[in-house]
Amino acid sequence: MLAILLSLLPFSGMMGCWQFFLVCFLSSPFILYRGSLEGHVLSSIFMVDEWSGSLIFLSFWLGALMMMAAKPRISGLCVWGVVICCFLAFSCWSFVWFYVFFELTLVPMAYMIVKWGSQPERVSATFYMFLYTLSGSLPFLIFLVSYYYSSYSSFMGFSWDVASSMGVWGCAVVVVFFVKIPCYPFHLWLTKAHVEAPTAGSMALAGLLLKLGGFGLMRAMGCFGQLSFSLQVFWANVGIWGGVLSSVACLRQIDSKSLVAYSSVGHMSLVQLAILSGTIVGWVGALYMMIAHGLSSSGLFSVLGEFYGKVKSRSLVVYGGLEMVYPGSNLWWCLLIVCSMSCPPSLGFLGEVMMGMSICSIFPFGYVLCFILLFFFGGASMMVLYTSVMHGSFSTALIPSGVGISKCSYLGMFHGVPLIILFFLPAFLSLRALSGVL
């Protein structure tokens, strides 16, 4: 697959970004899903199994939608760079190369924010993103270098006993992924980056970059084993309470993009908790939730970007009554809100049920109560977002001339409909691969 993508690179400018991503999208299933349970080994560095294949498939799907949502002034090379870096990270067999591509995704993302962000605060948002992610990754890099020179191996299959014998390195291995997910209290960079990023950048952040953290945490725990009980309880407490606080913070947001960003922290905190449970049901639910969140949150940001082009504001105070002016967008906006609330029949509902089962089986009843609170406040914030945008009075003076609604409808449809289809096709997400890894 890597050879195919690199061979197509010189022709991507001639064939157009849409055609390039279409070729990648149509060719990926033949490569990703013909492997065995252990995976299809591409080289000594890259291996694509049925587990990572679903996230790679998501990357190319969202890549095409990001090109559709991107403004004409935004270079397709940045979007292409984010997607390819995510593809390489998802398909890496080596932790060293995974770290390289894991951090390399920051380069095109930072360029999009600085180059095409709309506010002067975009520079500080980029600084926060680099500060948090690189600071969290430094201990992991030191651990990789130390282990590489002690055993001359950089692959993902080494034993957790070696890491645990190094003391604090066991915690350093997981902190890097908690920053990327991101988990509370490492989430401050995400909200700033979302607010300042252009629409395509917000879609890439929510749909792809956050999934690198969950994927890396799964790979690390699958190779190294479970954390010690004290560390597991500590990070579980941080994750569940951080998710509740983030969901409550959603209700206090005036900026629509900031509200969706805080809801992402709440959803991904459940993913963290499910992965820490160490159960197959929890891991499958986490995979479902990552894919569901990638589609729903990316869809919300894309539609909000179209609304911003019409209203010229992100404030929920200014929004209102778009249902009467643009009735075509109401259906898809409602579908994305419902999917973001994890209501049936959406893939997020299936993921939350499975994650709830794993939480109930491993953690005390207090965690279950927090899980219910997180679900309640998260749903309430989505209802506030829907009613603030679609209902109420609307000032026609805020509508710029010559703006169509067709692209908004297409973006909502291509994000929302797959969530309904995947609810009835769970085998597409390759459950066998997770059981094989565990």
Image: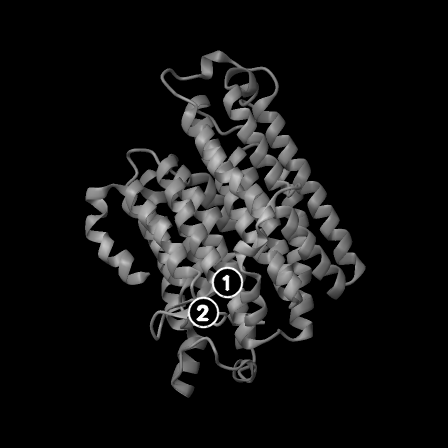
As drawn, 111 above or below 229: above
Residue at the extreme right: 365
Local crowd size for mark 2, using a 10 Å CA cut-off: few (<14), some (14–19), many (≥20) = some
- Residue 138 lies in quadrant: bottom left
Q: Which residue is mark 2?
A: 39
Element type at marker 2?
loop
Answer whether residue 103 is visible to the viewer in this image: no
Q: Position of residue 52 (x, y in %)?
A: 47, 61
Element type at marker 1?
helix
Q: Position of residue 266 (x, y in %)?
A: 62, 49
- Residue 279 lies in quadrant: bottom right
On the picture, is 36 further left or further right than 251?
A: left
As drawn, 374 above or below 414: below
Residue 208's disc is none
As drawn, 54 above or below 347: below
- Residue 151 lies in quadrant: bottom left
Q: Position of residue 263 (x, y in %)?
A: 59, 44
**Mark 2 or mark 1, which is nearer the start of the sequence?**
2
Q: Residue at x 27, y 62 (%)?
A: 3
Closer-to-camera residue (356/116): 356
Quadrant the C terminus occupies: bottom right
At label 2, the amino acid type is Gly
At label 1, the amino acid type is Trp
Q: Which residue is mark 1?
A: 51
Closer-to-camera residue (114/350): 350
Q: Residue at x 23, y 47 (%)?
A: 12
On the picture, is 174 further left or further right than 99?
A: right
Q: Kindly indicate whether the residue at mark 2 contacts the one at mark 1 (C-beta within 8 angstroms).
A: yes
Q: Position of residue 156 (x, y in %)?
A: 46, 75
Q: Residue at x 62, y 39 (%)?
A: 250
On the picture, is 277 further left or further right than 102?
A: right
